[in-house]
Image (cartoon, rainbow, N blue to C red):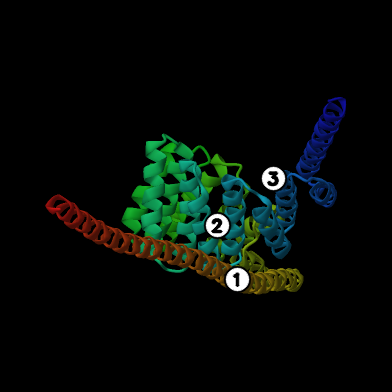
Amino acid sequence: MKKIIIFYYLYLCSFVALSQNLDDAYSLLGKENYDSAILVSRLVSEKTSNTNTKGDALYLIAYCYQVSHDYSEAVNYYLQAEKSYTIDKCKARANGNIGAIYRNTGLYKEAIDHQTQAIKLWANEVSKGNSLIDRAIAYKHKALHDLAIVDGLEALRIGYINNNEKLQIRALNQLGLIQKDIEDFGEATVYFKKANTLDLNKKAYLNLGKVYELKKDTATAIDYYGKTLASTKNIEYRFKAYQNLGEIYLSRGLYKLAISHLSKALEIFPKLQFQEVEDIDVYKTLASCYKMQNKLQATPILMEGYDLQTKLLMEREKLINKYKKESILKAKQDFQNELVKNEEHKRQNLILYFVIAFVLILLITILVINIIHKKKRKKEEKTAIKYKKALKEVSEKLKSI
């Protein structure tokens, strides 16, 4: 009994130590010390025998690579985490992040596949709603607007039923962006204004600005972009607002204002969690401004933009190859599973045939025994009749004497 208690105590101590190590890793992540967070998480993943703790450690490694913009490594570790987890919500979260990486690197089909898997796994309705919006974004980029609207409306319904304003805001903004893409600016404006009444970060201001910019009403667009900058600290929204303002001022020939706003966008760019290929246009636009002003900064900024674009495109190529490899492995695994399933089916059929054959043989045997038994009884009955008849004849002869 003492040995069992000691073993259990040591197991608890080791589990607490591993949890503490993961806490240390999260602390390092908060300090943006990604290399150290990865090292600590990797040690936990190697030491632990608990598959979900291992999944958490691998997930943290993946997230560190994601925020460091090493997307191929991030996907690699998210996939490992997803395989290690036994809990559906953890698997869903990993699939959701993989989908987000694929979407932001322009691999929309792959993004849809992983978001669909996440939607199937989520038990929590609000989390499912967020994954529906993520899939809607990928559908929108693939110009599958009808499917995107269906997902957006379903997410909005979930947001209303669960009284979740954040989900409602995301759904309304996304539905507005879809309407903007199909150039139904009136409907887009309605959705954005509804979102604006709920959203403290005022992303709808940014989206409304883009709608008016597309309608060639740049004065109103500038006003809404200004409201975005005045009402939110969200770096993604601020980056887009500065970038869009810079482009408008460049189109008006106001190069100093364009350079000022694009330079501010460029300061934010390295801090973005996701750096998309189209966002690198900010370098090209700023370089164009400097070129118009005959300033020497144009060439180095343009070269920096090309370097970043090349890096992101290389990451995208790695992800494409990884997805292909993942698809081949999945197909191979599915084929092997099908073979095992078929073999099991054959084995079960063989057992069933054996049982049926045994039952048939047993029934035939019983039938044969029954027939033999009946024949024997009939023979015995005939013999008994003959014997009785003989006795009767003998009896009658005796009486006559």
Seen in the picture, residue 381 relative to 329 is either above or below; the reply is: above
Seen in the picture, residue 47 relative to 102 is either above or below; the reply is: above
Residue 20 in the image: x percent, y percent? 81, 35
**What residue is pinned by disc 2?**
245
Seen in the picture, residue 111 relative to 198 is either above or below; the reply is: below
Q: Which amino acid is tagged 2?
A: Leu
Mark 1, Cα crowd under 10 Å, few <14 / some 14-19 / many 20+, is few
Name which of mark 1 and mark 3 comes first in the sequence: 3
Seen in the picture, residue 74 relative to 31 is either above or below; the reply is: below
Task: Indicate the quadrant where residue 332 lies.
Answer: bottom right
Disc 1/disc 3 C-alpha distance (Å): 26 Å
93 vs 83, nearest the viewer: 83
**What residue is pinned by disc 1?**
336
Residue 363 in the image: x percent, y percent? 37, 62
**Is label 3 or label 2 in front?**
3
Q: Does the image show residue 272?
A: no
Residue 240 in the image: x percent, y percent? 57, 55
**379 relative to 52 in the view: left or right:** left
Q: Which amino acid is tagged 1?
A: Gln
Disc 2/disc 1 C-alpha distance (Å): 56 Å
Residue 9 in the image: x percent, y percent? 83, 29
**378 relative to 146 in the view: left or right:** left
**57 relative to 256 in the view: left or right:** right
Task: Indicate the quadrant where residue 106 lies.
Answer: bottom right
Name which of mark 3 and mark 2 comes first in the sequence: 3
**Is label 1 or label 3 in front?**
1
Q: Secondary structure at mark 2?
A: helix
Mark drawn on residue 152: none
**What residue is pinned by disc 3?**
52
Name which of mark 2 and mark 1 comes first in the sequence: 2
Q: Secondary structure at mark 3?
A: helix
Residue that sits furthest to the front in the current view: 401
